[in-house]
Amino acid sequence: MFGITEKVTCEIEIKKSRFITCLIPVTDSSDVKEKIEQIKKEYPGATHYCYAYILLHDKRCSDDGEPSKTAGQPILNVLEKHHLYYILAIVIRYFGGIKLGAGGLVRAYSNATIHGVNQANIVPFILKQHIQITFPYDLEQTILKQYPNFEITNKTYLEQITYEGYINQDEIQSLLLLSHIQVVQLETCYRTKKE
């Protein structure tokens, strides 16, 4: 199970048609819709915005006006072959005036997606626990030293310190054993491994 760490954009030209591939890391289906709308604004006037995405238990694709199964499905096939998750692949086509035929479209959309995947920084996903912990100020350094893989996304300093973030699934049990710490487990999810 793999993902990408950042957006990738590349372009190929096939028989005067421009195929612009955008690979984008996404978190959920609402994030997917938002990213598709952003791409349509970034690349106005394209003939087609064909896409595929894979989340953990949800995958979809769209031919966006191209003949059935000649665009979205080939894009999805490339993502599946590379075991990519939490990813949106959009291939934007500006028609160049020469028709490619069904086989040509399948090859074009597949090759455009492969070109993008080859340029992406692909990393493994690991199982993480999304948590919120609250603890006294004197424990801050202990937490930071004992859990160097704790990916902190938010810090709040009030009467006590509250961190929110992602911790390796296997470290949760030892964290729960620490005294004077409140742990709220929010969700279990997959995250790309940080280098």
Image (cartoon, rainbow, N blue to C red):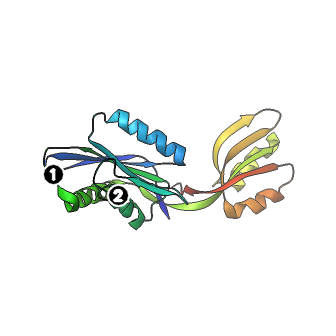
Q: Residues within 10 Å of mark 2 (few under 14, many from 20)?
A: many
| Residue at 16 percent of width and 44 percent of height | 96
Q: Is residue 158 visible?
A: yes
Disc 2 marks a residue whose amino acid type is Ile
In this rendering, would 159 be left or right of 72?
A: right
Pointer 2 residue: 75
- Judged from this view, the residue extending furthest toward the bottom is 81
Q: Which numbered disc covers residue 3?
A: none
Q: Position of residue 155 (x, y in %)?
A: 69, 38
Q: Nearer the viewer, residue 130 or 193?
A: 130
Q: Element at badge 1?
A: loop
| Residue at 20 percent of width and 44 percent of height | 95
Q: Is residue 27 visible?
A: no
Disc 1 marks a residue whose amino acid type is Lys
Q: Nearer the viewer, residue 136 or 79?
A: 79
Q: Residues within 10 Å of mark 1 (few under 14, many from 20)?
A: few
In this rendering, would 106 be left or right of 188?
A: left
Q: Position of residue 123 (x, y in %)?
A: 47, 59
- Gap in angstroms between the C-alphas marked 1 and 2: 19 Å
Q: Element at badge 2?
A: helix
| Residue at 21 percent of width and 45 percent of height | 18
| Residue at 81 percent of width and 43 percent of height | 138
**Disc on the earlier residue, 1 or 2:** 2
Count the labels in the image. 2
In this rendering, would 161 be left or right of 11?
A: right
Pointer 1 residue: 99
**Where, by quadrant of the figure, is residue 81 drawn?**
bottom left
| Disc nearest the viewer among 1 and 2 | 1
Do residues under tags 1 and 2 come within 8 Å of each other at their CB atoms?
Answer: no
Q: Position of residue 150 (x, y in %)?
A: 65, 52
